[in-house]
Image (cartoon, rainbow, N blue to C red):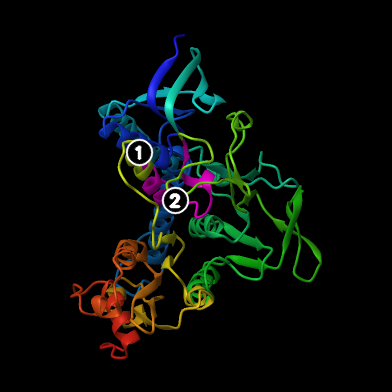
Amino acid sequence: MPTIECNTLVIGAGPGGYVAAIRAGQLGLDTVIVEARAPGGTCLNVGCIPSKALIHVADEFDKARHFANSSPIGISVAKPEINLSDTVKWKDGIVKRLTGGVGGLLKNNKVRAITGWASFVDGKTVEVETEDGVETVRARNVIIATGSAPVELPFLPFGGDVISSTEALDLAAVPKNIAVVGAGYIGLEMGIAFAKLGAKVTVVEALDRILPLYDADLTKPVAKKMKSLGVDVLLGAKAKGKSASGLDIEDADGKARTIPADKILVTVGRKPLTEGWGIENLVLEMDGKFLRIDDECRTSMTGVYAIGDVTGEPMLAHRAMAQGEMVAEIIAGENRRWDKRCIPAICFTDPEIVSAGLSPEEATEAGEEIITQMFPFAANGRAMTMEAEEGFVRIVARKSDHVVLGIQACGGGVAELSAAFGLAIEMGARLEDIAGTIHAHPTQGEAFQEAALRTLGHALHI
């Protein structure tokens, strides 16, 4: 086959890759994107989107079970049933619509898409194994957006009843017993969902707390909810392997025991995909296990950029998207730099957790003298009417000038407040700016304004 020549070649069509390609196409750059499966990468196919679909179904089923008992709000229904196969079909339909939409956007912006596995020959050339043979692509600029994959434990290899989050999203039926190894956000999102669907869930975590990246104030409401759902959380416990009856562990006291489990869900993190695409043929500097990049996402090789999970934490789709857009504009000659004050992170647990910017501890460790307060949803009218009184909004501000350094929240539906939180920090808002902005009533967003007022010393509704 003749060599395909282009200005910009994108390896990987996940959130970072496809956004980079679309933006490059919009800017008139001759662009090719290579992806081994449907566009959208992990996020659209087996990550963010399908997992949130499952979480939504679990929430609705749990709500129906709530109404089948003695609901305090006057609704009563028959005992609900769940058909997980139908749920998976519905989820797959959403994924198909979204991946098809991405494919259409690439086509509309004149991006040439090649389905296959790319391997670098040198810093400008890749060979792509497709169903029709090997295609060679040569580009002036290359964007590596290969993403990440679930970490596999050597004593719990994936296969059979040992599954990653990918397989958990395609189960034909709800397991009677499921053991979750790892109490990070993926493990708890999935664990809570399956508990709501009727599984007996046990979480095994080697550390002494759940969600170790978040402070105790944010995680306490989640721990309380898991307890009410009957989820057993074993802290300081180590998974040891699979046996005929379930998961073998060593508990916090050093005693061996077995957790009954039809499925063992391993969620101990994700690793960057730095192998299998010819990295040995490139001269790339590494930052630990990640590709090293500068504030323009340039690697150590001229004309080679890297974005998304392969470049380090935080491994978030919206970070990759922002990097992809920026790199396309840099290649097109625009003056851009990566200078983000915050990248909001969300746990879609119950209740949800949002963190933008610095926590109180992080701000103090950075040498800031801070003031901070929280406003509870128990004092928010909208939260009361939604039966979502657990949680709060908290603001961290510099004491000297009241500039907001961080905003955190825990509560039902607080993921939708993340845009406001991120905007406030990116715009350099002060407490007075947030307190002086009229927030619509009745909304959960009022808790944001009240947290600012309370940090200033004059909350109105508490």
**Circle on res. 328:** 1
Q: Label 1 to label 2, Cα distance in Å?
A: 14 Å
> Do the residues under discs 1 and 2 have CB atoms within 8 angstroms?
no
| Residue shown at the point (60%, 45%) measured from the top left | 286
Q: Is residue 210 visible?
A: yes
**Circle on res. 68:** none
Q: Secondary structure at mark 1?
A: helix
Q: Given this view, does label 1 or label 2 mark the residue nearer the observer?
A: 2
Image position, residue 378 (x, y; %)? 35, 81
| Residue shown at the point (62%, 67%) measured from the top left | 233
Is 246 or 141 nearer to us in this picture? 141
| Residue shown at the point (58%, 30%) measured from the top left | 277
Say what amino acid the circle numbered 2 marks.
Answer: Asp
Q: Is residue 320 magenta?
A: yes
Image position, residue 211 (x, y; %)? 56, 65
Say what amino acid the circle numbered 1 marks.
Answer: Ala
Image position, residue 439 (x, y; %)? 20, 73
Image position, residue 126 (x, y; %)? 51, 23
The magenta-colored residue range is 304-324
Other-residue count near label 2 (Cα within 10 Å), few / some / many at <14 / 14–19 / ≥20: few
